[in-house]
């Protein structure tokens, strides 16, 4: 009998292929199953390219079981496993958590992680030039000489060399071809310098040292805890948390630290301070960072190479490999709340990230949010206090200027009391900050003939006059027009009148009152870019400006040693309006601006112009009674069951068809949940009811803390099918309420 082939050899039953569940960065909650082809390995967290309909997309292998009931022939194969470090389990757990908390599709949250990391494989190396042995035969020109002067052992690209030498790229290339430069390959994403925790920091005061000891001990425990560093402006909070960062760097060579700031484009002095302390620049992450630099940061963080990151709230979503500490500086700031896409509160997500990753989180502020104070009171967060300024500096004296008793001249905004104080300050050759949190020249433009208020088209938003650019600008929609000379409504000539003051108008008044003083405006729209702002802040720091007229852009983190007088032009601004957070916010911003005065050896003074000095916010500011204010506010919130003593969410419905919108809102109102501990109000017009032709209605949902507000919302909102023409936005923990 001849040898028979083993029938098993040709068995049709194949070994089943390995399956993976892939989450894609698009607005869906679930991923899709794919199969890996022979030779592919893709553990959870791997970046993969997969087919989706006619396209291919980059997604992430999610740590989730695949569906065993799907037959293999229905599954498409993964096209490619990208050669990049996989996402850590922490980062993926964080995506799931944020999606669940904010009621957002998981894919949308994953997009926050992947954004700017789209190009995941290392980019091609570039050519850089370093100094070479210059051949005798080289023909020298003055341009070539300039280039040679700029070369060193550190490689620079042709463009960089040309820029530094002030010559064209062609000169550099010509020189290289003639053998005057040596070409080498450089990584376009140079690694970040290694921070050294043991460089000598500043000697801490006994109070600071004690605070630092609590925090370094927490770091050494290597588990989750949340801490509040509560200290007056200038007490050295930064100095103290730098010690916690140093201790975290010492834990392991792989630890990473994320420092969040509300506004980082203008915080050059802060970045310098980090660099001085650790001998290496931190990676920066915010909207002004170039796309090439973003790619570098993203990649270096994903590799675990970048250990120190300073960024805006979005830095929470970087692909850290061993995140071991988050610092949230100015934790009370509104800027931590994201207002589009995934509506998250960065401070709260930072705490969640620490809990998921099992490491400490530090919240830093001179005026902590009421949420944070309640968390301290209830024992969830530890507290470290720094009640006095560092060194000889003392807190400024604060006085109210009662504008009813000391009104400004007609058509003016500064009270004689403030003018007198400015005179005295300038007489001592010290600096003044006039604070008004209103950009432009005037907040409202009115026609004197017909009374028409200028608004943005199809919106309920006012047009604000900007003299600097001679335009009317809408601060909500970005719409702007050259200032018309006729009223667009009644046609009257030269009848458009500015009403109320903005910073430009205060600067105009200041220039008339103090013609010899050097006066500058600092407001986000006056800047030709962060470069101009930085130079303005530098001049202010060096005492070259006498009077700075500024919006909140100047409130944060700057030390102007010769600034001794801060006057708030309209301290009442922000107190009006139905927003329950108005008092808290006004107190915080005014405290912060006040904190700019007298930071160094000279005593500071703060004047608050107010038409309602008896208002609890203004009165508490004048008394310097932060705790009393917070206590009273917290009591009020508790009585109403509002955050932090209850949960709140806003549901905003918007659409272009007002009638349809009303119908949908009525339908939803008809099925509101009636459950213990749940209240639903609305629908009512949302703040900015009409925006760019879209109408907006809002429901507010309030629950007790025992209720899962997410489940309540899920259940309620799924009862009605909302048509595609109506957009539904759910905002858990809305900033305004
Ligand atoms: P905060 O963050 O509380 O506003 P900072 O950490 O910015 O305070 O400190 C305020 C000022 O005091 C800064 O100019 C800082 O350099 C200085 N300072 C604070 N602590 C020290 C210290 N231990 N030694 C020297 N200077 C200090």
Image: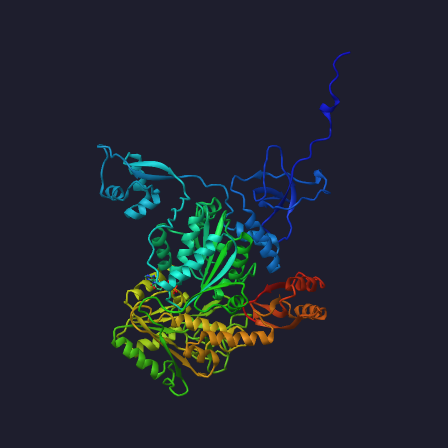
Ligand 1 shows up in the quarter that is bottom left
Residue 221, compared with residue 562, is above or below; it is above
Rendering coords of residue 287 (x, y %): 45, 56
Rendering coords of residue 465 (x, y %): 43, 73
Q: How many marks?
A: 0
Residue 437 in view, yes or no: no
Residue 445, compared with residue 136, is above or below; it is below
Rendering coords of residue 681 (x, y %): 65, 73
Instruction: Name the residue at 35% across, 36% down.
Output: 184
Asked whether, in this view, residue 656 is left or right of residue 613, the answer is: right
Q: How is the image coloured?
A: rainbow
State the quadrant of the N terminus: top right
- Is 240 in front, or is 419? 240
Give the farthest residue toward the right: 1
Residue 172, compared with residue 727, is above or below; it is above
Rendering coords of residue 39 (x, y %): 60, 32
Instruction: Name the residue at 32% across, 42% down.
Output: 154
Q: Which image quarter: residue 79?
A: top right
Give the farthest residue toward the top: 1
State the quadrant of the C terminus: bottom right
Residue 278 in view, yes or no: yes
Residue 704, compared with residue 277, is above or below; it is below
């Amino acid at each position: 009998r001849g040898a028979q082939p083993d029938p098993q050899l040709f068995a049709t039953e194949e070994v089943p292929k390995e399956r993976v569940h892939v989450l894609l960065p698009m607005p869906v909650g679930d991923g899709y199953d794919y199969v890996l082809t022979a030779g592919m390995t893709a553990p959870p967290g791997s970046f993969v390219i997969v087919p989706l309909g006619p396209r291919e997309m980059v997604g992430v292998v999610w740590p989730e079981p695949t569906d065993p009931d799907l037959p293999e022939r229905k599954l498409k194969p993964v096209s490619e496993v990208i050669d990049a470090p996989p996402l850590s389990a922490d980062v993926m757990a964080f995506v799931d958590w944020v999606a669940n908390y904010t009621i957002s599709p998981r894919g949308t949250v994953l997009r926050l992680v992947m954004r700017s990391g789209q190009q995941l494989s290392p980019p091609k190396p570039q050519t850089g030039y370093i100094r070479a042995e210059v051949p005798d035969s080289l023909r020298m020109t003055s341009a070539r000489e300039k280039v040679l002067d700029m070369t060193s052992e550190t490689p620079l690209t042709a463009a960089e060399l040309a820029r530094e030498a002030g010559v064209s790229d062609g000169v550099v290339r010509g020189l290289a071809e003639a053998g005057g430069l040596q070409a080498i390959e450089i990584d376009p994403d140079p690694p970040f310098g290694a921070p050294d925790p043991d460089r000598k920091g500043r000697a801490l005061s006994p109070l600071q040292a004690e605070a630092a000891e609590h925090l370094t001990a927490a770091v050494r425990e290597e588990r989750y805890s949340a801490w509040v560093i509560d200290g007056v402006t200038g007490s050295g909070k930064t100095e103290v948390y730098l010690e916690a960062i140093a201790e975290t760097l010492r834990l392991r060579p792989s630890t990473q630290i994320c420092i969040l700031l509300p506004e980082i484009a203008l915080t050059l002095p802060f970045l310098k301070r980090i660099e001085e302390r650790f001998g290496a620049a931190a990676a920066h992450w915010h909207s002004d960072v170039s796309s090439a630099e973003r790619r570098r940061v993203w990649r270096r963080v994903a590799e675990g190479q970048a250990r120190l990151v300073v960024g805006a709230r979005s830095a929470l979503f970087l692909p850290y490999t061993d995140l071991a500490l988050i610092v949230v500086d100015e934790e009370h700031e509104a800027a931590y709340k994201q207002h589009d896409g995934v509506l998250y509160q960065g401070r709260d997500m930072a705490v969640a990230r620490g809990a998921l990753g099992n490491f400490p989180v530090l919240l830093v502020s001179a005026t902590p949010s009421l949420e944070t104070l309640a968390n301290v009171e209830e024992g969830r967060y530890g507290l470290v206090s720094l009640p006095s300024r560092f060194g000889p500096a003392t807190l400024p004296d604060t006085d109210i200027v009662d504008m009813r008793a000391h009104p400004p001249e007609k058509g003016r905004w500064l009270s004689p009391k403030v003018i007198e104080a400015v005179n005295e300050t300038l007489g001592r050759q010290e600096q003044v900050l006039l604070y008004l949190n209103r950009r432009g020249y005037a907040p409202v433009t009115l026609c004197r003939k017909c009374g028409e208020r200028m608004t943005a088209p199809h919106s309920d938003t006012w047009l604000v006059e900007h003299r600097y650019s001679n335009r009317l600008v809408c601060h909500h929609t970005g719409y702007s027009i050259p200032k018309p000379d006729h009223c667009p409504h009644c046609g009257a000539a030269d009848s458009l009148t500015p009403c109320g003051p903005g910073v430009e108008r205060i600067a105009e008044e200041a220039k008339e009152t103090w013609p010899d003083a050097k006066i500058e405006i600092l407001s986000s729209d006056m800047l030709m870019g962060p470069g101009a702002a930085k130079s303005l802040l530098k001049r202010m720091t060096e005492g070259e400006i006498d009077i700075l007229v500024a919006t909140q852009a100047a409130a944060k983190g700057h030390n102007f040693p010769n600034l001794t007088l801060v006057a708030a032009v309209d301290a009442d601004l922000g107190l009006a309006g139905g927003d329950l957070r108005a008092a808290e916010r006004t107190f915080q911003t005014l405290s912060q601006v006040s904190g700019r005065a007298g930071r160094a050896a000279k005593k500071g003074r703060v004047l608050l112009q107010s038409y309602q000095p008896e208002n609890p916010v203004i009165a508490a500011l004048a008394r310097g009674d932060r705790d009393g204010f917070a206590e009273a506010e917290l009591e009020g919130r508790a009585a109403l069951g509002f955050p932090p003593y209850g949960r709140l969410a806003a549901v905003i419905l918007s659409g272009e068809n007002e009638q349809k919108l009303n119908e949908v809102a009525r339908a939803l109102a008809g099925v509101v949940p009636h459950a213990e501990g749940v209240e639903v109000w609305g629908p009512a017009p949302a703040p900015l009811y009409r925006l760019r032709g879209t109408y907006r209605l809002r429901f507010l949902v309030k629950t007790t803390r025992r209720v899962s507000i997410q489940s309540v919302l899920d259940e309620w909102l799924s009862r009605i099918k909302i048509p595609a023409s109506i957009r539904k936005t759910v905002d858990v923990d809305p900033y305004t309420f």
